[in-house]
Amino acid sequence: MQAAERAPARVAATDPVLVHIKGAYKHFPIGGFGGLAVRAVDGVDLEIRRGETLGLVGESGCGKSTLARLITALMPVTAGSIMFDGQDITRLRGGGMRRVRRKMQMIFQDPFASLDPRMTVGDILQEPLDNFHVGSVRERRQRVQELLRLVGLNPNFTNRYPHEFSGGQRQRIGIARALAVNPSFIVCDEAVSALDVSIAAQIINLLQDLQREFQLTYLFIAHDLAVVRHLSDRIAVMYLGKVVETADRNDIYDHPQHPYTKALLSSIPVPDPVVERDRAPITLKGEIPSPVNPPSGCRFHPRCPIARVPGVCSEVEPPLEPHGAQDQVAACHFAGQA
């Protein structure tokens, strides 16, 4: 990642919480299979503080994107509560939910599929303004041009269609659309995963600039752990529907407590051929268990290098408890011992 090194604004543990997830579950029933369900999100407790960037990482299928859609109320929870700015959005309906939706937006992974190919860029950016009746028709058009300037695009591009832009430009349009109604919280769901490295670096720097200018709060979901460290204030690690560790970005990279976090971090390549040659990445055994029938006890124990089986790891589910540095929690019976 060639993004310029800019430290994110530091957010203290005492800063107010904007999003508070408590015991969130999302199960998808499998029809005709006797009550079986895919347990995509299975009891998540998480806080996102106002003004911070929380990075969310984990293997594909662990529930990151499903959790993002629960937070933004794009799908209902099976159980649990999600508090946004002091309101339980799982109970909101109608006008109450509409008012909250204006405060939260999402930037999607695919910058082409997320834009309607039949609409011009001007119509795409004006649609949320029309939806929420923001200003007059003239003010909305001016706002569209302002949004294009904010994300580094020519304000005269309003009559062009998405297919006329590159991938990086389309993602800038997606960011502009997310900013249209002045939200306080934005979910970036793999927002740079589909972009070339140099273009991704530009988008990351743009996101940081916008965060400083508009005091935004981000949930940043990604597979690239180097990108997550660059952009995030804190990092949460998910495995098979659960959060297994949360900490300040430096603490989680320098002193990971959960063995799964250590395995993820060991997979990051080091840009030094001598160091990389002598490194011994942690290789996890076995396959990721099915979210339809997750293992008993600790869900990571079938692949864990320090699991005690039979024993407490296969029999008792570990809670998220303080381990390591201040404000660092991990769900492991033997945290820090790997």
Image (cartoon, rainbow, N blue to C red):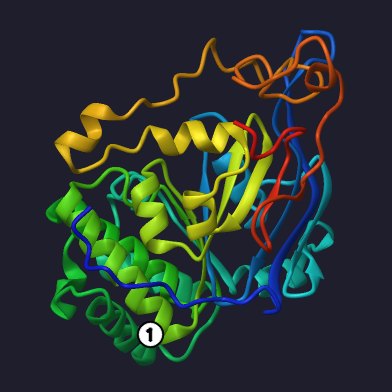
Q: For residue 120, say whether it is visible.
A: no
Circle 1 SS class: helix
Q: How many numbered marks does the figure carry?
A: 1
Using the rendered view, name the quadrant where residue 89 is placed: bottom right
Left or right: 221, with 329 as reference point: left
Residue tagged 1: 140
- Who is closer to the viewer here, 241 or 144? 241
Image location (x, y in percent) of residue 304? 62, 21
Say which of 275 and 144 sits in front: 275
Front-most of residues 152 and 290:
290
The correct choice, above or below, for 10 with respect to 303 in the image is below
Q: Local crowd at mark 1 within 10 Å, few (<14), some, or many (≥20)?
A: many
> In which quadrant of the rendered image does the C terminus lie?
top right
* Left or right: 221 as drawn, with respect to 327: left
Residue 275 position in % (x across, y down): 23, 37
Q: Residue at x 71, y 17 (%)?
A: 292
Identify which residue is drawn at 57% across, 17% down: 288
Residue 245 appears in the rendering: yes
Q: Position of residue 330 (x, y in %)?
A: 70, 44
